[in-house]
Amino acid sequence: MSKGTQSPVFCAIARHFKRAPLAAGLLSVATVIGVGGGIARAQTPPTLNLGLVTFLSGPAAGPFGIPGRNAAELIVEAINKGTLPAPYNQKGMAGATVNLVIVDEAGSTTEVVQSFRNLAQRQNVNAVVGYISSGSCLAVAPVAEELKMLTVFFDCGTPRIFEDAKYNYVFRTSATSTMDSVAAARYVKAKYPQTGSYAGINQNYAWGQDSWKDFDESMKVLVPESKEVANQFPKLFAGQYNAEISSLLVSKANVIHSSFWGGDLESFILQAGARGLQKDSRMILTTGETTMFRLRGQIPNGVILGGRGPFGVLAHKSPLNDWFRQQYQDRYGTPPIYTSYQMAQAILGLKIAYDKASAGADLPPTDAVGKSLSGLKYEAFGTQVDMALGDGHQAVTETAYGTFNFNKDTDTPEITDVVYYPAWCVNPPPSVKSADWIKDGMKGAKCD
Amino acid sequence: MLTLVAISVDGLVYAAWLFLVAVGLTLILGVMRVLNVAHGGFYSFGAYTAAWGIGIYFDRGWPAAGSFFVLAAAAIAVGLMLGLLIERGLLRWMYDRDEVIIALVTYAVFLILEDAVLLVWGVDPYFAYQPSTLLGNTDIATLPFPNYDLALIALALIVGGILWWVLTFTHRGKILLAVIHDREMSVFLGINVPRVFTVTFVIGAMLGALGGAVTAPIISVTPGIGVEVIVLAFAVVVIGGMGSIAGAAIGSLLVGLAHAAAVHLLPQIELFVIYAVMSLVLALRPRGLFSQAQMRRI
């Protein structure tokens, strides 16, 4: 048959089959795009914007804020990659990729609150983790409640947050400063039961005043034969303590309590060490662990150090702790201190809550996450966390104190004579205010 | 008795430190009528430069005794560099402006210097304790006092003595006094007042930096140390009277002793005792203890 004489049927069939490959091709492409797009949509996880507030400038940045931020970046990266040790190795929070929105906590309380509002209302974060200063926490808590913004405090110490108010959207995953002071008094009783006199030097603001009050009251209960002989409250960031150290030397107190932190703590250690304060008085520094690798041999041997919990060198050995310390050291060239642990603990708690509340591809609602976080018990990097106070919003943990020694043979700072105090030995029971619990003789404390 | 000895020695040490910190400020205020808020920045830079220099010095294993020269070198370097930069580069364009404007400008400079400290040295604290440990302690009535602190008293006396001698017995010192008393007449008499301003500002900056440099070995040098010093320095200057070296010395002594007495006897008032002294002095002598009588211009 020649070209010019092809039948119409054949032509129609030929046209069909000519178009068929094209149609089949188009259909295939459409299918691929549609299926691939669908797969892509199913595979792209949602994003969880997490506000992170910590000191990035000012005197608190170096000792606390930056270690906290460093820990946050490390943990969030591991969460997103799914490389946290088991059982926390699921990727993301409720499958969502976490995006940190970092804000500086420095500034007046008004500025801190305004920054929080910006995070919640302009930057539309899903949750906020942060706050070192007790003043910041006290100011932010009611605002977080008003805005229904899930907020987890990671470090601030005042017990007043959940003793003076109730919150639905505010949590704190680390214990209060009451734990530090009660444990300090217990350590003094255990190691130096003959203590006849004690003194204090604390910064003159809420943290210092509360710390001293709790220690003083605890000593009256635990070591009633001892008496307070001196009590100094220098200005925050004063930096020079010649007169205060002279006053402490004159008092000849057996034990000297201090909740100094940061540059004030280091200045005090240098000045007190130079004048031999440690010779007649046993110093107990409730946040001293933070400085042992910086000051090293400048810390007199025999000083009692705490770390606001079993953190840093006081942390229990575990796969989680080993992983955390190794990763932190490798990345930042220095061991993690207690604020690093507390930050990691807070973000981990949030992850667990999100995972528990997860019920689909989308992020779970804030209320559901809050319910999951409330009353949660979990193993963190240094200790067990039990959200047992404040109607399930305030954590209790154990804590530890030890005695500093600089090992000249190995040229390393060490803590020896470590004593761990169970959570219910150094924290008040639920629904009892810290100050009242101490004054009433710490009834119900479980120290075995 | 022990408490009295402690109050006396602590008061003198604190007074010496206050004098070293405040004398540069009173010099600038007296000669130039400039309320130099950036003085806190000079203090910070002096402290950080000294701490940084001490770290390098001891890392290189150089003789320990030479570390004291590092402190002096830090003060001179910071004072020269920042003093010239700020006076020649900024303030000299402002002298015909209102004094409040100039004060605001120096406040802005202070904020810039605080941020510059963060840019250069970061947020971590620095230590420079080595010089302070070299001199040992002296027991006074059984209380150990670091010889470094006692040396600060000597240094304050030397600095005060040199300034007094220069102002009283040298030609340049008398020119400075003339400018303090009457700037306009000084110009008419042919004194190069702008040059006097530059020299005064640089010397004031050096003295501010010296205050920071000698403090560095006994503290942890952290961001924000300049803020604490400004308030104290201004209080001493106000008590003593603007531009009076003797006033700065007496003011420092009053505040130092009052502070030490409060710490030992009534710690609850320690925070505001310096302001109580300031209020009392101003109530009796509104222009400070050693201020000059000011002619009222109609």
Image (cartoon, coloured by chain):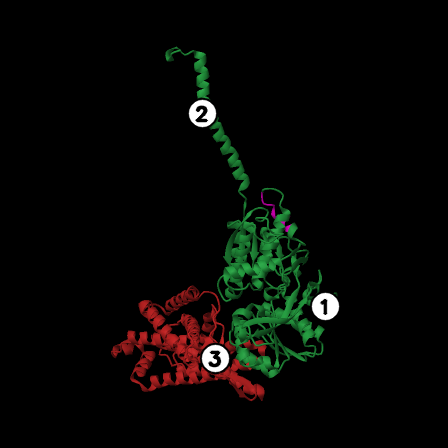
Chain colours: A green, B red
The type of residue carrying mark 2 is Leu
Position in image of residue B169 (x %, y %):
32, 87
Q: Is residue A108 visible?
A: no
Side of A356 where B273 appears, left or right: left
The type of residue carrying mark 3 is Ser
* Mark nearer the viewer, 1 or 2: 2
* Mark nearer the viewer, 3 or 2: 2
- Identify residue for label 2: A22
Residue B66: name its quadrant. Answer: bottom left
Position in image of residue B14 (x %, y %):
49, 80
Chain bearing mark 1: A
Q: Which mark is residue B67?
A: none
Q: Which mark is residue A442?
A: 1
Counting residues from the N terminus, which is met first, the one under dot 1 or under dot 2? 2
Residue B167: name its quadrant. Answer: bottom left
- Identify residue for label 3: B132
Q: Are marks 1 and 2 in contact (CB under 8 Å)?
A: no
What segment carries the magenta color?
A: A362-370
The type of residue carrying mark 1 is Met
Side of A365 where B213 appears, left or right: left
Q: Distance from label 1 to label 3 (Cα)? A: 45 Å
Q: Distance from label 1 to label 2 (Cα)? A: 84 Å
Position in image of residue B135 (x %, y %):
48, 83
Q: Is residue A22 visible?
A: yes
